Image (cartoon, rainbow, N blue to C red):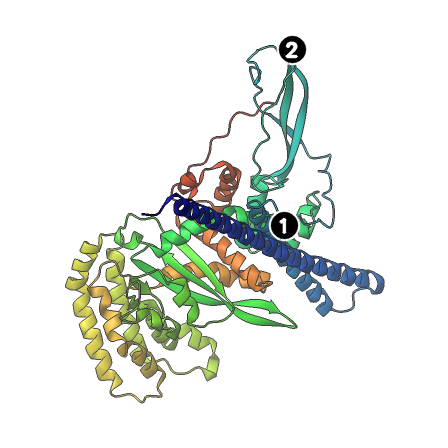
Amino acid sequence: MPDGSDIDALKAALAAAEAEVIDARAKATEAEARAANAVAKVSDAEAQIATLKLMIEKLRRALFGQRSERKQRLLDQMELQLDELEASATEDELAAEQAAADTTQVKAFTRRRRSGRKPFPEHLPRERVVVPAPSACECCGSEKLSKIGEDITETLEVVPRQWKVTQTVREKFTCRACEKISQPPAPFHPTPRGWAGPNLLATIVFEKYGQHQPLNRQRDRFAREGVDLSLSTLADQVGTCTVALRPLHDLIASHVLMADRLHGDETPVPVLAKGKTDTGRAWVYVRDDRPFGGPDPPAALFRYSRNRSGDHPVEHLKTFAGILQADSFAGYNRLYAAGRLPGPVTEVPCWAHARRKFFEIADIAASKGRGRNAPPISPLAMEAVKRIDVLFDIERSIKGETDARRHAVRRELSAPVLAELETWMRAERAKLSRHAPVAKAMDYMLRRWDRFARFLDDGRICLSNNAAERALRGIALGRKSWLFAGSDRGGRRAAAMYTLIGTAKLNDVDPQAWLADVLGRIAETPQSQLDELLPWNWVPEQKFDQAA
């Protein structure tokens, strides 16, 4: 047995080891905080450079006048870049604050805003919301309180077509018995150092990502309504909203990837690059069990990437195992490998996509529009469209039924139609040249026939991938308005916001009203209760009566 000296030596060694671990952790925390500060400083410097470049270009225009239409487009591009850089800098500043909070050795980096916020316009109406005063002294319990003053916090808020400044009044009282001063605590702001109310924040975010109105256009509209807000000020609020809403985004992402079946698709997104515009990609994964009467709420998860590499869907769906309804993009192929972990993904192609190939050849209206150069209408393509439409008619009759009911109807009604379609298509394909357009449309289906027929064996499978295509429709419309994303960082931020807005729409919730209510409540909502703010659980909060 070890003697007392050995035990003391072991205790001393253990204490030294624990001290070393604590010291190492402290140094690691300090290093992380310094790294976060460095990132925040770089982001702030980039935003400052963009601001100065924009100022220089505006001064040149003021001195030499409008030189060309191209210069106006350049100015718009510079403002969009500033928009993205300001929002990114604010995100990094908040990350540096969070990292520095865990150490006393590093002071968090705080951005120096380039222009002080202007006072709220005097012509805006003021609405006083008085926080209920304490009824007794917090120190001694005496009820002999006497008001000695009040603190007013002004928050800029927007209501439809009307602006106002909300004054939150916190009255001060002093105790006549012990002279203790009592005052209610300051209210939570939706965002750190916030001056904008939740309705205004929701308006800015929803207009930018839901209505495809860039911040420079919003700034101009606000100015016409009598409220002058700079582009950097608006971008700063977008960055803070992104951070504030990230916990809800992560909950939606987890909900989507836990599904048994997903719809997947992607679309090009122009991205601003040095001297040119590159083509990035917006990806979407939609969970929607309503077609087969599933009880789980629908949701959409958007992702962004700089290219169309198959590495991206593999990374996006690394925790997913189940049915994936998508087009035949080769980038998904690695997901379908038999030995994939955490489990195999079952490929299900889109009948609407296959039908479209025949419809384009059989589109009489489009052919008439091309005049003499129009190719002849293909009778085979017309026949293929008619036969496929029979399957869609059956699907419409069982929409919303249980998966068992859908499976039974498909085996009874759809299976014979599908068998006849295959027999007819293989017979007609044997008579065609491989270069015929309709032959290519047939080959697309015949080479994947076993996958196209999988809907017969599983009532959860949909005939089309229209759920994903509908989710991407907003981006397709928005491209004509905002033209391009300002950066990769901006693309990822947009994907996060599209996730929130798209999920609200799928649950028949007004995205702007939901964002406004959530931004007003999320700061004081415990982590364990964040589920209550998700669109499918959301109940608008009843505001307390406002005293004049």
Q: Residue at x 45, y 59 (%)?
A: 302
Left or right of 480 on screen, residue 50:
right
User: What kind of element bears circle 2?
Assistant: loop
Q: Is residue 47 visible?
A: yes
Indicate the position of residue 199 as horizontal and vertical percent values.
56, 40
Q: Is residue 46 above or below residue 169?
A: below
Q: Is residue 83 visible?
A: no
Instruction: Work out which residue is located at the far right of the displayed protein and give it.
Output: 63
Indicate the position of residue 111 as horizontal and vertical percent values.
68, 50
Indicate the position of residue 473 as horizontal and vertical percent values.
46, 61
Instruction: Return the residue at label 2.
Output: 176
Left or right of 209 on screen, residue 363:
left
Q: Is residue 187 above or below residue 73?
A: above
Q: Residue at x 61, y 57 (%)?
A: 39
Left or right of 231 on screen, residue 413:
left
* Nearer to me, 495 or 542: 495
Indicate the quadrant where residue 489 lies.
Answer: bottom right
* Nearer to me, 355 or 120: 120
In the image, which disc is placed on residue 421? none
Instruction: Return the residue at label 1.
Output: 236
Dot 2 surroundings within 10 Å: few (below 14), some, or many (20 or more)? some
Quadrant for the C terminus in the image: top right
Q: What's the residue type where badge 1 is placed?
A: Asp
